Image (cartoon, rainbow, N blue to C red):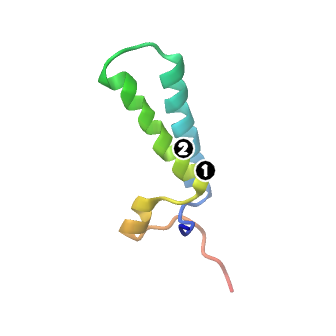
Amino acid sequence: MFATNVGGIDRILRIVVGAALLLWFFLGQGEGFWHYAKLIGSVPLATGLMSTCPLYSILGLNTCPMKKA
């Protein structure tokens, strides 16, 4: 479906940051915009798990190592 364009370190950082934001949302108490803004963590978590980022595709970026022939 999508080409893999997220490399190893980038992928790990996305998963860690996304999971941390979602954990903070579910464990933290609060109301208002900033409490629900933590749900944005689902985006880096999803892109890290799928190893593809639509924004990287649009911008022509790729953090995956090159495959050698």
- Picture quarter with the N terminus: bottom right
Under mark 2, the amino acid is Leu
Q: Residue furthest front?
A: 1
Q: Quick one: label 2, few (<14), some, or many (20+) residues within 10 Å?
A: many
Relative vertical location of residue 26 with respect to residue 44 in this rendering, above or below: above
Image x and y of residue 25, in percent: 48, 24
Return the residue nearer the eye: 52 or 62: 52
Residue located 40% across and 71% down the image: 60
Q: Are marks 2 and 1 in contact (CB under 8 Å)?
A: yes
Quarter of the view holding residue 34: top left
Total marks shown come to 2
Q: Position of residue 62 (x, y in %)?
A: 49, 67
Identify the mark at residue 6; answer none if there is no mark: none
Residue at image x 58%, y 60%?
7
**28 or 16: nearer the eye?**
28
Q: Quadrant of the C terminus?
A: bottom right
Q: Is residue 35 left or right of residue 41?
A: left
Q: Position of residue 37 (x, y in %)?
A: 37, 30
Q: Helix, strand, or loop for circle 2? A: helix
Q: Position of residue 9 (x, y in %)?
A: 59, 53
Residue that protrudes farthest toward the right in the picture: 69
Residue highlighted by disc 2:
45
Kind of residue at disc 1: Leu
Residue 4, relative to residue 50: is it above or below? below
Residue pointed to by mark 1: 49
The image shows residue 49, relative to residue 19, as above or below, that is: below
Label 1: which secondary element: helix
